[in-house]
Image: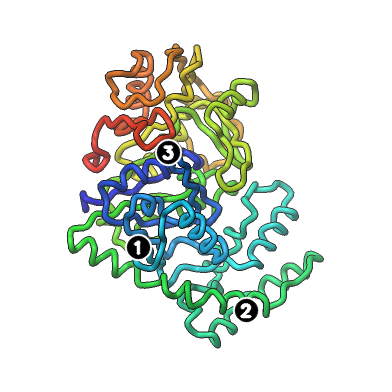
């Protein structure tokens, strides 16, 4: 295994603060590679009070690092170029010299957004997607009718593939009484974007192989989180791509024996956007406090996040199925004002106590959390960058969480800024 490389994954339902950690860790990397998701993901990086909001672009670009978007990502051209424009306005220049997109990455088309909205409308129980067409784009990928960036180089092939894709989706739309979609506007837009998109594209798998052979280090950046993985998450309330460490390999073309250590990112509490089971959810004033204090609103959508206590049962599953070697614990400072802090250590389901339960199982819908309670420290931790300077009760909570999850906690964050970071151990050394 390559001990120069590191995979950063969300260990809950997303929004754990992966972007700022990737930004911080990118200082030790040569390349930052994004491997899954689309512009439904949102990463916020705060540097000297200035916020950079990213969706498709690898977070390391803000650090001046080489960026890669792998074949596991789906690209919406308008969103991609709009994000590049926003970054340029903030002083981050993005060009084919510092960003490469896998030539086999699939595209998100206007019809995908229409299908996404129609699917949510027709479902008895809505999934709570971002309605940006990500799910239908992945459906086309698996259905072998997707349009990939490399297809843009051949207008004839592009038109043939677009005909097949539209025939499939328009039949479904028409069958449900919705309006169908015309080909020409989509084709014209794709042909307009083709030259510039193709200028960013290349054989990412080969590029990364050469970089590793030359001794360069790669930081693999995941979007969403393990509990939203299409196989291992709280199905069907999941995303449409793989979010585990194994997806860092398949989503970039790197062998699994070369991806390196795996850093999971978890808040000191838990949040979730959209529908689906959430055993430790706090639907009360305390949940509203966490939402307000933690600024728990979606980067892209502005949707409020559901908030609750940290769930060790959920976290242990994420650790085990993704092979996480250490955890970064974020947003410790959000708990500063609390007199009492709880951590879920087991579930009671139909009279049975369990500390390891599959979140893909419907049984979790009826799980009653069993908590351990901790006294709060009731003083500020924001900006503390040394473990020894933390209040004793905060240290006790961190040490107990580490005991419960059975892997090391390597990083603790105490605020949104790049420097609000406590390093307990190098995550690359946890293998």
User: Which circle's residue, 1 or 3, is located before the other in the chain?
Assistant: 1
Report the mark closest to the observer, 1 or 2.
1
Q: Residues within 10 Å of mark 3 (few under 14, many from 20)?
A: many
Residue behind mark 3: 317
Q: Quadrant of the C terminus?
A: top left
Residue 81: % across, % down: 52, 63
**Viewer can see residue 179:** yes
Q: Nearer the viewer, mark 1 or mark 3?
A: 1
**Residue drawn 37% across and 72% down?**
202
Looking at the image, which is closer to me, 290 or 250? 290
Residue 407 in view, yes or no: no
Residue on which the image places disc 2? 188
**How many angstroms separate mark 2 from mark 3 (CA)?**
46 Å
Q: Secondary structure at mark 3?
A: helix
Of the image marks 1 and 2, the number of the one nearer the N terminus: 1
Q: Residue at x 78, y 64 (%)?
A: 176
Residue labelled with disc 1: 98
């Amino acid at each position: 295994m390559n001990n120069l490389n590191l995979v950063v994954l969300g260990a809950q339902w997303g929004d754990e603060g992966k972007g700022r950690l990737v930004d911080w860790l990118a200082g030790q990397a040569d390349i930052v590679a994004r491997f899954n998701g689309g512009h439904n993901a949102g990463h916020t990086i705060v540097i000297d009070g200035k916020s950079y909001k990213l969706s498709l672009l690898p977070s390391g670009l803000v650090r001046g690092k080489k960026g890669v978007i792998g074949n596991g990502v789906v690209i919406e051209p308008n969103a991609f170029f709009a994000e590049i424009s926003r970054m340029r306005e903030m002083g981050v220049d993005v060009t084919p010299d510092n960003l490469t997109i896998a030539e086999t990455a699939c595209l998100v088309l206007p019809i995908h957004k229409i299908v996404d909205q129609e699917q949510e409308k027709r479902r008895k129980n809505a999934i709570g997607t971002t309605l940006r067409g990500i799910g239908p784009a992945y459906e086309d990928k698996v259905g072998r009718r997707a349009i990939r960036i490399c297809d843009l180089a051949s207008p004839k092939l592009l038109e043939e593939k677009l005909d097949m894709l539209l025939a499939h989706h328009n039949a479904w739309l028409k069958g449900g009484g919705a309006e169908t979609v015309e080909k020409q506007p989509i084709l014209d837009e794709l042909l307009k974007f083709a030259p510039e998109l193709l200028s960013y594209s290349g054989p990412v798998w080969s590029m990364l192989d050469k970089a590793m052979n030359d001794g360069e280090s790669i930081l693999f950046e995941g979007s969403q989180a393990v509990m939203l993985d299409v196989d291992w998450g709280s199905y069907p309330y999941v995303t449409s791509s793989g979010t585990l460490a194994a997806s860092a390999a398949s989503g970039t073309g790197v062998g699994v024996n070369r991806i390196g250590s795996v850093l999971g990112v978890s808040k000191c509490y838990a949040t979730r956007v959209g529908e689906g089971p959430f055993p430790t959810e706090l639907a009360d004033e305390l949940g509203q406090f966490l939402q307000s204090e933690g600024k728990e609103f979606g980067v892209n959508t502005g949707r409020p996040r559901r908030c609750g206590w940290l769930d060790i049962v959920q976290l242990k599953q994420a650790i085990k199925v993704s092979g996480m070697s250490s955890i970064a614990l974020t947003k410790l400072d959000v708990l500063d004002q609390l007199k009492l802090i709880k951590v879920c250590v087991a579930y009671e389901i139909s009279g049975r106590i369990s500390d390891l339960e599959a979140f893909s199982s419907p049984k979790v819908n009826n799980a009653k959390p069993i908590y351990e309670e901790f006294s709060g420290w009731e003083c500020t931790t924001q900006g503390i960058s040394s473990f020894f300077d933390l209040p004793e009760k905060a240290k006790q909570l961190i040490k107990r969480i580490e005991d419960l999850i059975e892997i090391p906690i390597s990083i603790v964050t105490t605020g949104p800024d790049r420097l609000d970071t406590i390093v307990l151990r190098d995550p690359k050394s946890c293998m």
